Image (tube, helix red, strand yellow):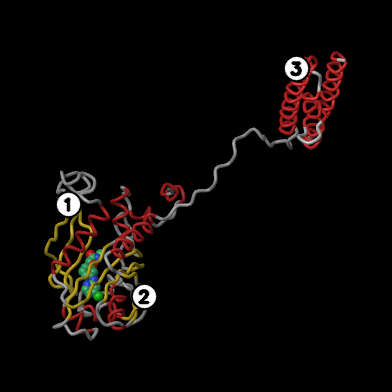
Amino acid sequence: MDTDQVAALEEMLKEASSEIAEAEDEAALERARVRWLGRRDGRLTEVLRGLGSLPAQERGAVGAAANRAKEAIGQALERRARALAEKGVEEAPPGVDLTLPGRDGWQGAVHPVTSVIDEICDIFRGLGFTRARGPEVETVWYNFEALNTPLDHPAADEHDTMYLGPCTVLRSHTSPVQIRTMQAHQPPVRIVVPGMCYRRDPFDASHAPAFEQIEGLAADEGITFVEFKWTLAEFARRFFGPETRTRFRPSFFPFTEPSAEVDVTCMICGGAGCSACKGTGWIEIMGAGMVDPAVFEQVGYDPERYTGFAFGMGPARIAMLRYGIPDIRMLYDSDVRFLEQFAR
Ligand code: 2NL
């Protein structure tokens, strides 16, 4: 009785092995697995389930044979699955090598000037400034006269500004947007204005005739030089790092009084002096100042009641400093091999 059962199991194993070996594809192999090892009514599963009702003296030998058969069928299934997978590779169309590694996904990048603009605007958003924008084609009044810059000022010269007609220009800075905003809204106004600007400059390593600028303006009652200095110093700490120090050097702009060039401690040498800061330890990042009362008068703000500050910077220059880019033209010829390096 005992030996009959063991012989029957050996017969089952033989039958299962040849069925598995003949399975021509994965579906046939799965059908074979279910027929022999299927959880509900696999033929071997049923034998294993029946062990419990065998007389105790038969259980050992039959159980051992059944487990051997189960193990052997499992191994045959695995072997056949591997063989079928390899066969699939061999049968790939000519010229297609299915053993090659898969292709990486495409990784997109943000343009370095765009990411600098977004970061700067985010920092100023945290300081209470709203992002504003306006037209790139402007009248000479918005581009110059409203900004306390008479049309005989060198900046308004045809050599420096792109005129589209006698009274229209491509804006040479984003300040006209601040003028438009002040005309439309009473104080308090706190805005940052990123956007393209245009000047008749040669396209060389340090100038581009079309370039981004970010300007900012705060106009309110009670704004002092202290708020002006603190805001720009805090911006510098948030952008360049908490250890960054700032220095305000006296300067001149027609639309601010007093005016300053703002320097930060060199982010490359930390202030010790290197080639990036020409040995000074300082790097200029923007121009700024207290808004000239004449500008407030142009937009109808009472200069006795309101004060404010403004600043302007070139994000392309800041991107060049941050990433060590030697030539501004690299930022504008969109060589994908260059831009791909900014993928995170
Ligand atoms: C620079 C200097 C500056 C401003 C821009 C401004 C705008 C208004 C009123 C007063 Cl509406 N000032 N803008 C002020 C100081 C400097 O830019 O070097 N830009 C790259």
Viewed as shown, does residue 11 lie left or right of 159? right
Residue 318 is marked as: none
Tell which of 163 and 171 is nearer to you: 171
| Callout in the foreground (2, 3) | 3
Residue 134 is marked as: 2
Q: CA distance from mark 2 to mark 1?
A: 33 Å
Whether tag 3 and tag 1 are in contact, CB under 8 A, the answer is no
**Residue type at numbered disc 2:** Gly
Residue under label 1 = 282
**Mark 1 secondary-structure assignment:** strand
Residue 291 vertical position relative to residue 52 in the rendered view, above or below: below
Q: Is residue 339 visible?
A: yes
Q: Quadrant of residue 219?
A: bottom left
- Compare marks 2 and 1 and give the one earlier in the sequence: 2
User: Within 8 Å: ligand 1 and the Cβ of disc 2?
Assistant: no
- Compare marks 3 and 1 and give the one earlier in the sequence: 3
Residue under label 3 = 64
Q: Which percent across, then down, holds residue 276?
A: 22, 47
| Callout in the foreground (3, 1) | 3
Packing grade of label 3 (10 A; few <14, some 14-19, many >=20) is few
User: Within 8 Å: ligand 1 and the Cβ of disc 3?
Assistant: no
